[in-house]
Amino acid sequence: MSEWFAMGGHGLYIWGSYFVTALFMVVEVVLVMRRRRSVVLRLGRMIRMKDSEVSG
Amino acid sequence: MFNLFKYSSPASFYPLAGRLAVGFGIASAILLVIGLYMSFFVAPTDYKQGEGYRIMFIHVPAAWMSMWIYVVMACFAAAGMIWNTRLSSMMASSLAPTGAMFTFIALWTGALWGKPMWGAWWVWDARLTSELILLFLYVGFMALESAIDDPRRAARASGLLALVGVINVPIIYYSVQWWNTLHQGSSIKVVDGGIESSMSEIMLWTLLVMTFACWFYAVAVSLSRVRSTILERESGTAWVKTLLKGEQA
Amino acid sequence: MDKALLEIKELECVRGDKQLFSALSFSLEAGSLLHVHGPNGSGKTTLLRAIAGLVLPENGEICWNGESTEQQQDDFNRELLYLGHHYGLKFELTGYENLKVFANLSGSDISEQEVEAALTRFGLAHCVELSVKVLSQGQKRRVALARLLLQRAKLWILDEPFVALDTAAVALLLGVIKGHVAAGGMVILTTHQEVAMDAGQLQHLYLGETEPR
Amino acid sequence: MDKALLEIKELECVRGDKQLFSALSFSLEAGSLLHVHGPNGSGKTTLLRAIAGLVLPENGEICWNGESTEQQQDDFNRELLYLGHHYGLKFELTGYENLKVFANLSGSDISEQEVEAALTRFGLAHCVELSVKVLSQGQKRRVALARLLLQRAKLWILDEPFVALDTAAVALLLGVIKGHVAAGGMVILTTHQEVAMDAGQLQHLYLGETEPR
Amino acid sequence: MLSTLRCIVMRDLTLAMRHRSDVLTTVFFFIIVVSLFPLGVGPDAALLKEMAAGVVWVAALLASMLSLTRLFADDYNDGTLEQLMLVPQPLSLIVLGKVLAHWIISGLPLVLMSPLLGLQFGLEGDELIMLMVTLLIGTPVLSLLGAIGAALTLGLRGGGVLVSLLVLPLYIPVLIFGAGAVTASAAGMGADGHLSLMGAILLLALVLAPWASAAALRISVE
Amino acid sequence: MLSTLRCIVMRDLTLAMRHRSDVLTTVFFFIIVVSLFPLGVGPDAALLKEMAAGVVWVAALLASMLSLTRLFADDYNDGTLEQLMLVPQPLSLIVLGKVLAHWIISGLPLVLMSPLLGLQFGLEGDELIMLMVTLLIGTPVLSLLGAIGAALTLGLRGGGVLVSLLVLPLYIPVLIFGAGAVTASAAGMGADGHLSLMGAILLLALVLAPWASAAALRISVE
Ligand code: HEM
Ligand SMILES: Nc1ncnc2c1ncn2[C@@H]1O[C@H](COP(=O)(O)OP(=O)(O)OP(=O)(O)O)[C@@H](O)[C@H]1O
Ligand SMILES: Nc1ncnc2c1ncn2[C@@H]1O[C@H](COP(=O)(O)OP(=O)(O)OP(=O)(O)O)[C@@H](O)[C@H]1O
Ligand SMILES: [Mg+2]
Ligand SMILES: [Mg+2]
């Protein structure tokens, strides 16, 4: 098994590539989702506040 | 044709984008699992490079994506400038971060591949250099967009830049290639050629699967990014209001 | 071309996420003056800039002699003189040089005497050879206003033209505006100062939520 | 320290080859307002900047509580608030952030509520989160003026503070000035607009060749 | 048409002459940057000669770029730019006039100065002439492309650095062919190919850049 | 004292963060300039390795200098600077705060970025560390000295180029010792002498520059 991970001496390079790629993709997805959540929250609050201003 | 125009309005595109993003996301995940399995367990060890060549299965898709996304982005920007459709410029700006990410990944994996193969992290080769410049073009696009406060102005300015950039991309590509062949022997090309000729059928298929996984990933991510942008820019309209009220409740 | 006509049709302007005005329509004939009122931030400057073609409206159209100004920007610009909050002067040049450049660019060919006469009329005779940079606020403003006498534009758009002027200069400018309107010109202006305006056909436009007081 | 006192002694200012004023002397006590009059280019701005220490006078002295301001620039600055033609605001920051920075730097420690109250008082409640750059002229001016409410300066030097303000804001600012003078502050201001001023001890100073009309 | 162009060029030249130091500073910046390299790299003559064309060209790029920020910024800040946009002439013509003036002020002096710097690095005869010729064709392209960047970044904070980020990648082909031509001629190979490519780039830029800059200006002034 | 310093530094950092791209652009400028050289000089690895320290240092100089123009200019144009001068605190303290912020924004990122660029040019191990250390000591000096130039050229037209003219000569000692240290360590010689000289320059600049810049500001704002 560990031999497989060593990848014939190229393990560091291969795993370095795959790991960084995975990291970037995960981070990008998380960032996109977080942005979406914050946008929905912020705009929702804004719209609610405007509504209460009009009615109240 | 009629349908296309219907979906070019943000209000009707928003839900469609949501459904498409989920679809492409799932497809990308499935292809990614298959592709990773193939790249590590199915594809044979290369007779010349040993295991090291397995970096190819992300390097090459990332490199292809980096260039393809720029072209798509410029097309959206052009459509946005010509027909003044808001949605196009939003798509352009939401493609850019993903494109920049793939460019960086291509550079990173290339460097990690280069060390064992050429003994150097970096050489000033034509392909490498023009990829680096592509990263600068992406960063310039994003920097300009984020430097302008007003979103509509930002979209128009960065769209113009994307257009100018896309004229420049082939010029850069050929100039760098020519510049390089003038000075340096083609030692690197030989290695490349070696890989290509030795590429077995199964390697080619793995590469293809991984490429489509990356492509679908890019589509999914930029579609969900554009959804946030649509909400922000259309926050004054009635449909966003009703939509958000529904989501809060 | 007999009578010039400016028509604003269903204009809407948005800044950021704020709609400043929408469905704004009016028209302006030769020989009339439009005074745009409104509290700070109500969108007067934005409206004036939109008419001049410096701001892209969200919706609506601006027509000059029946044709949209976008289609005939050059022709419209020839008839237009816009003076905004900024002076639009090169501070390193003298007042004379500044006026000369504008006269040249607007295509009218104007003699030295005319430029000098305009400067003198605005009380700047003693500082023609000074660069605009060292002039006082009011003097800078006067240099910018001297363009009114030189360029033969039909439509004047003046954003707070009375700012920084002393009482003598305010009276002078009022006279110039009245003369222009009487000669069949058109003027659109805003001002927060109380200035007695009664030139030609006087129209009023109120922007903002507050009603005229 | 009982009563603050500003004394101008034999002041002379020269710009280029032009002597703006010379042998100008006056003094200003706590609770009084000085209105500097004069046509465009008569040297009002120059005088105000000289008092604030931003222009080096050719001759003469400015004394604060009996001592030359040059000798005690830091102490004098603590008592001084100068608002000129420029707004002195960072356009990229919001109004709130701008005020906060000035309050911090002037050494007075001011709570968020106070800053918000000042902005609200000047009718800017709805645009606290906008960067100053996108505000209208009048709104920018209001942000700058909100500093008057926050910094506890004794001497206010205001160069044409009413410019770009709508009528409501002019009335508001007048009230603020009167309040400051009544509470023992000192104000020096210039304006070309006709504003009804009758605060504390009202003094007038006429610059320029023309006599008061 | 021509009188408008002349009026704009003369106006900008007059403004530059009002501060004669302007013209000099670009040249001096060029000279200083070129002179920094021997200090940083060390005084090895062969190494320096090999670097010469590259260093001179990079310095020219930077000098031209540095003066770019000023191209529209002054006019923008004092409101003259919006007045120029209201002039009854095509905006791209006015842009062309301003670019021309910019080149005369900050490009031409570099061309005239370059042989001297080449000499310092040990270049000779043909190489010097080639350096001058490439700069003569190349610097107008720098001004033209730079105008796009300057127009796009107008009124933005940190415009100076941002403009370089946008513009330097666009400059790369000019740099490669410019420096390449000198090196090729030094190696005894013909540089005709390089030169005709640069000419083509110049033509392309001359046609497209004023138009793109004008579009960018309209966006920025809004 | 300290609270004033903190307030100024925080204010400038907030301003920079408002446009996060500001910070990035300086770094990218640095990267781009360094990458231009191989394009100009050609891709010969040995030649490039020999140039490396010089090129990186010159690029750092230029990047730091380019962002200098902004140091006081924004504050000057909108009138904030005259307000800062009226603050009841020594002006040199305020200058120090602004310089500190400038270094954090535009110096520190260069230091952190330099090893990567060194790698591209084929530097290794010790040389990379030495490159970083010299930049760490050197870049604050660049910001400090640069502040004097920025203050002197404030409000002058073409300040961008003029400032480089004033400041680059002042930078030369830092450049020589900085690039020299890297070359020395690459050649296997000790670089201690270089480093301690750079430390001395840093101390001197830290004491004198804020004071000199404050004096220059008073002259410029008049
Ligand atoms: C930082 C270093 C590198 C960068 C920036 C880079 C960039 C690129 C780019 C842009 C492409 C797509 C070009 C095209 O399709 O024409 C590509 C493809 C490829 N690269 Fe790299 N590369 C790097 C290092 C390497 C190394 C070290 C190797 C192998 C020894 C390698 C092997 C390949 C192969 C096999 C392809 C696919 C060629 C094809 O399209 O047929 N790359 N790379
Ligand atoms: N990005 C933005 N987000 C929200 N509001 C904005 C934005 N940009 C501009 N605004 C608002 O748009 C308005 C612009 O008004 P404009 O300058 O036209 O006012 P005005 O009537 O000329 O006022 P004044 O009398 O003060 O000159 C301001 O109220 C400003 O706050
Ligand atoms: N270098 C110079 N040579 C000659 N005169 C100069 C020079 N610099 C400034 N001046 C004059 O100095 C005066 C400066 O006046 P200042 O700005 O103080 O006027 P002000 O009273 O504030 O006028 P305003 O009401 O227009 O604001 C102007 O008349 C200007 O022409
Ligand atoms: Mg206004
Ligand atoms: Mg004044």
Image (cartoon, coloured by chain):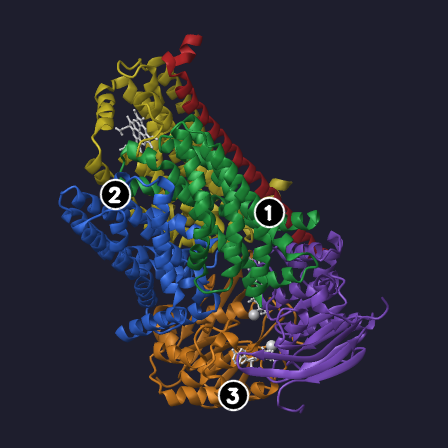
Chain colours: A red, B yellow, C orange, D purple, E blue, F green
D189 lies left or right of C185: right
On what subunit does the disc labeled 3 rest? C
Residue contact between numbered discs 1 and 2, judged by CB atoms under 8 Å: no
| Label number found at residue C123 | 3
Q: CA distance from mark 1 to mark 3?
A: 55 Å
Q: Is residue D112 above or below residue E24?
A: above
Q: Which residue is mark 2?
A: E49
Disc tally is 3
D168 lies left or right of C114: right
| Label number found at residue A43 | 1
Q: CA distance from mark 1 to mark 2?
A: 62 Å
Q: Are marks 1 and 3 on the same chain?
A: no
Residue F41's x, y, as percent? 28, 41
Residue A12's x, y, as percent? 42, 19
Residue type, numbered disc 1: Leu
Residue depth check, mark 3 versus mark 2: number of the one nearer the observer: 2
Dot 2 falls on a residue whose secondary structure is helix
User: Image quadrant of residue C16?
Assistant: bottom right
Q: Is residue B66 above or below residue E65?
A: above
In this rendered view, identify the residue nearer to me: E51 or E165. Answer: E51
On what subunit does the disc labeled 1 rest? A
Residue type, numbered disc 3: Gly
Q: CA distance from mark 3 to mark 2?
A: 63 Å
